[in-house]
Amino acid sequence: MDEKDVHNDNTDKYSLRGRVFTKIREDILAGKYNQNDELKETSIGQELGVSRTPVREALRQLELEGLVNIVPNKGAYVNGISEKDIHDIYIIRSYLEGLCAKWACEYITQEQIDELEEVVYLSEFHAKKEHHEQIVELDNKFHQLIYEASNSKILNHILSDFHHYVQRVRKITLASDLRAASSNKEHTAILDAIRQRDGENAEMLAHEHIMNTIRNISERGL
């Protein structure tokens, strides 16, 4: 990571601190670190090719998200995401995803509908081939397209963050051929409701889609 490449970008997402923050957060959520592991500024800085300052700033931001605990005069330690956190996130998501789908019925463009149709088609293809990596990517894209179609930057931001928080669990659940197929059928139903501009039905189907994921998580003991 070259500091010079990003100093002039005013968008925090692409700023040095933003990039360091994103990388550390992704590593935590992907399971690179265990609960209570120490996050050493010097080691992370060397790994990312940056000074300790942006690492320190990123760790402070991660503490605000609850992923890191900074102990004065000791260091920063991983909190991670607990089972209760995952359950809470999915419950909250079930309502916000419903609202998102409902609003999408009002604002979605034909181009976005076409993109969703392509995602559903490709998901069905890869599910039959048991291409789990592609299924996860397409699942991400399906939900992201609806977030964008809701015309709400607030919902888009919150739900996109939730997706990051539970990425490991999502990969595991979608690795099940049965759940992958069921998930795509649910996506198809949501898309049909959105295409018909049926906000109430789209909201109900999107809510139920996430609740089905919660049930799948519980059944698999994740």
Image (tube, helix red, strand yellow):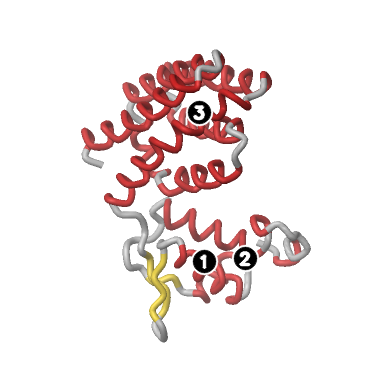
**Above/below status of 62 relative to 56:** above
Depth order, front residue of 105/111: 105
Q: How many marks?
A: 3
Q: Assign a secondary structure to mark 3.
A: helix
Residue found at x 50% / y 28%: 101
Which kind of residue does numbered mark 2 sit on?
Answer: Arg
| Quadrant holding the N terminus | bottom right
In space, the residues marked 1 and 3 are separated at their CA atoms by 30 Å
Residue 166 image position (x, y, % from top left): 40, 45
* Residue 109 tag number: none
Which is more N-terminal, label 3 or label 1?
A: 1
Label 1 CA crowd tier, 10 Å (few <14, some 14–19, many 20+): some
Residue contact at pointers 1 and 2, CB within 8 angstroms: yes
**Above/below status of 84 relative to 137:** below
Q: Which residue is mark 1?
A: 61
Q: Which residue is mark 2?
A: 17
Q: Specify whether 162 is left or right of 48.
A: left
The mark lying in front, picked from 1 and 2, is 1
Q: Which residue is mark 3?
A: 101
**Above/below status of 128 relative to 60:** above
